[in-house]
Image (cartoon, rainbow, N blue to C red):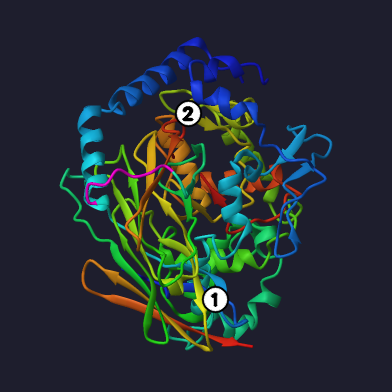
């Protein structure tokens, strides 16, 4: 379903314990399960149902999504940066697929 | 290049048809569903209308993509932080929109996303803290439906 | 004649609220994206049917405008990134990619979208960006043509179009037989179609700025295409929008890529001359 790689925007550097803003966007139809095709048959639901942001292996922020989230889900949130490290972002699809990407940040 | 009266009536008829099908059928059932979702989140506690700020457009140009943000006032310390925030849409086929899970490492209990609204309705944000408090904010978003879909 | 505002919008409570806060921006305050200024309002030259040429951007709410003004929040960039990847992907029997001939798109594709449709001497007709891309694919790459509204095509037109962002729309009507296509497009623009018996001009020339029920009519300018539409929840081509308009007035729509739509695209480019290319724009 996700035809392109997820987009994330994370600052490259931060000061110790700074609270930074992270933006993420992923390509996905977010088929709600409420629609019908041209023959009147319901189109089965297929959405991204879970998003997780880990920092150095620990979950910082996560989110459970419902069909009411728009296509191409956009999430903007905050994270505190105690040390240099790697953010890992994971999106979970109803069909079990996982899409993920990583971003490094350096504490100066 | 003028539009005749007849065309205007034709436009009006289409508009009326859309308006009728768009009406809420059972408003009461909607409130019940929302209340059930609030109770499930709060564990029965009555949410206090404070500390949560929900930001949504007064009028959404298209219900398919409505920007929405919230921010909860919280020290976000180990002892006292927001653990969960849920967004509900009272007039959607099912009220759940998303539930956000925070940790002290989130730094701030705030987020922005984009949601679908089937019609004009209330959007509700509920926040739960590690100290057992439940806070709420509620905003009405007008959704423009009809006109030139294309 | 802009003489029907009241009738078209009668009975729409929401419109009164919207109309109170005029969205039309102060001309001194041009919107910009990463420092690139967008001319969303320009003076019309003599002989132009409009007093002022205004981008669809100006008719949208601040929330929709904000989506376009930040390349990260603009969902159209998901396709731009696909297009960027496809640019250097070798395909077809000739073993070539776009890059093999055209090099760095940010150099070679600058201005291409701004001058479309463009006369193609060999074909003896104007080429839209889609026509040009498919000609490259079938004639030079030995690859299959892309369908007009396919994700592949939209990604490439978005990526190539982006290289002209901020540049003024300037179609060359002197070349070849462009004027006859312009004439044909103009005829189309003023011809009433469908059960509602409406021409493009009835909404987009006579009533822009007014409401048709809950929708605020724009001038129907083409400078942002392909664009991300909130209603579609994806990118779409200009010809998809044409088809949508024709469906709305209950007419039998022409096909994407048809001579009728290419002529209309040619005429619209002329009507929007001087506006900045906004590809990939965001609209409602």
Tell me what residue is drawn at x 67 percent, y 32 percent: C22
> For residue C173: magenta?
no
Image: magenta residue range: B43-49
CA separation, marks 2 and 1?
Answer: 51 Å
Residue A29 visible in the picture: no
Tell me what residue is drawn at x 55 percent, y 14 percent: C7
Of discs 2 and 1, which sits in the foreground?
1
Does residue C239 appear to the left or right of C33 in the view shown?
Answer: left
User: Quick one: C10 or A73, which is closer to the camera?
Assistant: A73
Q: What is the chain letter for disc 2?
A: C
Residue A10 badge? 1
User: Quick one: C176 or B121, which is closer to the camera?
Assistant: B121
Does residue C180 appear to the left or right of C82 in the view shown?
Answer: right
x then y, percent, for residue B87: 36, 50
On screen, A7 above or below C141? above
Tell me what residue is drawn at x 53 percent, y 50 percent: C238
Q: What is the chain letter for disc 1?
A: A
Where disc 1 sits, the SS reads loop
Does residue A82 appear to the left or right of B80 in the view shown?
Answer: right
x then y, percent, for residue B55: 50, 47
Question: In which quadrant is the N terminus of chain C drawn?
Answer: top right
Residue B10 visible in the picture: yes
Tell me what residue is drawn at x 22 percent, y 51 percent: B43
Determine the image quadrant of residue B13: top left
**Residue most extreme to the top:** B5
Residue C193 badge? 2
x then y, percent, for residue B50: 45, 45
């Amino acid at each position: 379903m996700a035809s392109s790689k997820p987009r994330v925007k994370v600052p490259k550097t931060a000061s110790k314990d700074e609270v930074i803003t992270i933006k993420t966007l992923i390509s996905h139809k977010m088929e709600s399960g409420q629609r019908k095709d041209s023959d009147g048959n319901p189109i089965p639901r297929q959405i991204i149902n879970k998003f997780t942001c880990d920092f150095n292996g620990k979950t910082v922020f996560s989110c459970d999504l419902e069909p009411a989230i728009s296509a191409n889900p956009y999430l903007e949130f905050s994270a505190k940066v105690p040390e240099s490290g790697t953010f890992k972002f994971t999106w979970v699809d109803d069909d079990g697929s996982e899409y993920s990407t990583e971003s490094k940040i350096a504490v100066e | 290049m003028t539009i005749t009266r007849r065309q205007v009536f034709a436009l009006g008829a289409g508009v009326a048809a859309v308006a009728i099908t768009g009406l809420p059928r059972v408003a009461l059932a909607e409130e019940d569903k929302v209340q059930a979702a609030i109770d499930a989140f709060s564990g029965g506690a009555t949410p206090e209308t404070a500390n949560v700020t929900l930001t949504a457009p007064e009028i959404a140009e298209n219900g398919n993509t409505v920007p929405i943000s919230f921010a909860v006032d919280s020290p976000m310390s180990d002892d006292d932080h927001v653990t969960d925030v849920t967004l509900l849409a009272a007039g959607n086929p099912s009220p759940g929109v998303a539930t956000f899970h925070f940790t002290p490492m989130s730094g701030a209990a705030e987020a922005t996303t984009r949601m679908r609204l089937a019609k004009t309705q209330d959007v509700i944000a509920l926040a739960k803290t590690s100290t057992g408090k439940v806070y709420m904010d509620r905003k009405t978003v007008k959704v423009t439906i009809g006109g030139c879909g294309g | 004649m802009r003489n029907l505002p009241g009738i078209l919008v009668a009975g729409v409570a929401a419109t009164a609220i919207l109309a109170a806060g005029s969205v039309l921006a102060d001309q001194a305050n041009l919107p910009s994206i990463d420092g690139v200024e967008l001319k969303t309002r320009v003076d019309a030259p003599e002989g132009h049917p409009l007093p002022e040429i205004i981008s669809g951007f100006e008719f949208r709410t601040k929330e929709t405008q904000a989506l376009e003004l930040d390349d990260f929040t603009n969902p159209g960039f998901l396709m731009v990134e696909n297009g960027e990847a496809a640019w250097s992907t070798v395909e077809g029997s000739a073993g070539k990619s776009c890059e093999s001939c055209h090099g760095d798109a940010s150099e070679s594709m600058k201005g291409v979208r701004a001058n479309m449709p463009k006369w193609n001497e060999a074909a003896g007709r104007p080429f839209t960006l889609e026509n040009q891309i498919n000609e490259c694919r079938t004639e030079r790459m030995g690859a299959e043509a892309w369908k007009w509204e396919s994700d592949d095509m939209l990604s490439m037109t978005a990526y190539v179009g982006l290289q002209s962002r901020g540049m003024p729309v300037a179609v060359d009507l002197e070349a070849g037989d462009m004027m006859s296509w312009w004439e044909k497009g103009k005829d189309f623009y003023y011809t009433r179609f469908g059960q509602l018996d409406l021409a493009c001009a009835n909404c987009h020339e006579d009533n822009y700025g007014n409401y048709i029920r809950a929708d605020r009519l724009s001038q129907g300018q083409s400078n942002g295409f392909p664009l991300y539409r909130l209603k579609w929840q994806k990118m779409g081509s200009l010809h998809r929008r044409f088809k949508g308009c024709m469906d709305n007035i209950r007419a039998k729509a022409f096909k994407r890529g048809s001579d009728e739509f290419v002529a209309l695209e040619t005429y619209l480019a002329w009507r929007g001359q001087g506006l900045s290319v906004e590809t990939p724009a965001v609209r409602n």
